[in-house]
Amino acid sequence: MSPRLFLIAGEPSGDRLGGALMGALKTLDPGIVFGGVGGRTMRAEGLQPLFDIAQLSVMGITEVLPRLPGILARMREATEAAIAFRPDALITIDAPSFTRRVAGRVRRRAPGIRTMHYVAPTVWAWRPGRAARMARAVDHVLALLPFEPPYMTAAGMTCDFVGHPIAGLPVAGAADIAAFRMKHDLGDAPLLLMAPGSRVGEVTRMSAAFRETLGRLQAERPGLRGVVPVAETVSKMVAELFPGVVLVAPDADPAERRAATAACRAALLKSGTVTVETAAQGVPQVAAYRASWLTATIARRLIRIDTANMVNLAYGWDNGERPIPEFYQDEMTPEALSGALRPLLDETPERAAQVAAADGALRALGRGGEAPALRAARSVMVALGRQPSLADG
């Protein structure tokens, strides 16, 4: 009998992970049955979600508190639905503040349901005790980074490195890029990718600096255009805050979104998954982030590494190199951002170093091997006892 799986994703990046995982699982067992919480990508794979994940797409201490009653209500709803679904496994995806609590409640009330989590907690960066807390709720972990499994197994969970899904994405070709430029009547204008975030709070705090940075660069390069891929959770807000830029709609074909990135000369990005997506298309970048004052103050006391950029992390884990410029909190000024972007818009040593580092980072994350989503699907099936090893199939 095919397994029944209940999946919970709490934000757009988790939705993309969940959608790819669902597609890969269906290739291994077409009869598999899904239930759970997800967004656009998971719905496209056949999920009928309990509620809109935009209700969970919030980050930071001061950002969460005003919405806590609603989040707790959704937590209860997801727990009840997962138990009623009677799955062979509950698979939670990222968003650990929400998903780990749901997994813990499900385990206490229905201990026969196997619990899995996709995306290991960043215990190597901060709060190492999270692995032990997760082990009280989770049986098996799918890790995106090659150095993460030992942290998970030491805490008592099983764990497989499955690779970062973005490492398996194709690189947009010349025809795709030309089609994107033609669709938006861009001619041969130089383009700057901008990604201010997928949460309302992020966009609110970062949009002004991003807009002014673009304006400074346009004053020096009059033909420069901004390109902003829009997350469904903030699409209306971004359209209002970034007039005059090329907006890539949230329902755009994935190939078009990749082409939109690859068409750009450089990128100004909110730290997060988008930094890896951009590196995968060979586009050099500058990363930035501004959290609320309280969130930032607490984070400074907890964080144990000197980078929040996944490309820097994957490329420099062993050698300590940090080729991607990063600007956080008060350092995130238009002067600093535009200064770091200028050399990336021309053929310079800084640009060449970033392109080489991105290639190295993507290989470390699984590029060139089996598709990460398929490897993740195999890991799930192995954990359920449906396949003898990850190497099979």
Image (cartoon, rainbow, N blue to C red):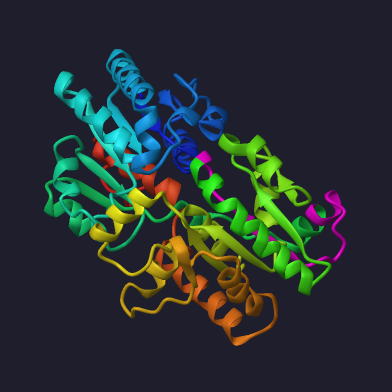
Residue sticking out furthest to the bottom: 349
Side (left or right) of 391 relative to 342: left
- Residue at the image point whose x is 25% and y is 31% from the top: 101
Q: Is residue 68 magenta?
A: no
Residue 246 to residue 354: above or below: above
Question: Is residue 362 something one can see in this rendering?
Answer: no
Q: Number of numbered discs present?
A: 0
Residue nearest the viewer, comparing 238 with 284: 238
Question: Residue 185 location in percent, x, y?
Answer: 87, 53
**Which of the 4 image quadrants contains residue 233?**
top right
74 lies left or right of 232: left
Q: Out of 217 and 190, give the one closest to the viewer.
A: 217
Residue displayed at 68% across by 83% down: 347
**Residue segment shown in magenta:** 180-200
* Relative horizontal placement of residue 131, taking residue 226 as reference (left or right): left
Residue 154 drawn at (x, y percent): 12, 54
Q: Position of residue 231 (x, y in %)?
A: 59, 41
- Is 192 part of what is drawn in magenta? yes
In the depicted structure, whether residue 122 falls above or below residue 17: below
Q: Point out residue 62 in the picture as x, y percentages from the top left corner.
A: 36, 40
Q: Quadrant of the N terminus?
A: top left
Q: Which residue is drawn at 75% across and 55% down?
A: 176
User: On screen, 191 above or below 53?
Assistant: below
238 versus 336 height, above or below: above
Q: Quick check: can you spot residue 351?
A: yes
Give the camera-side residue of 149 and 3: 149
Q: Is residue 214 left or right of residue 387?
A: right
Name, please, the residue furthest toward the top: 84
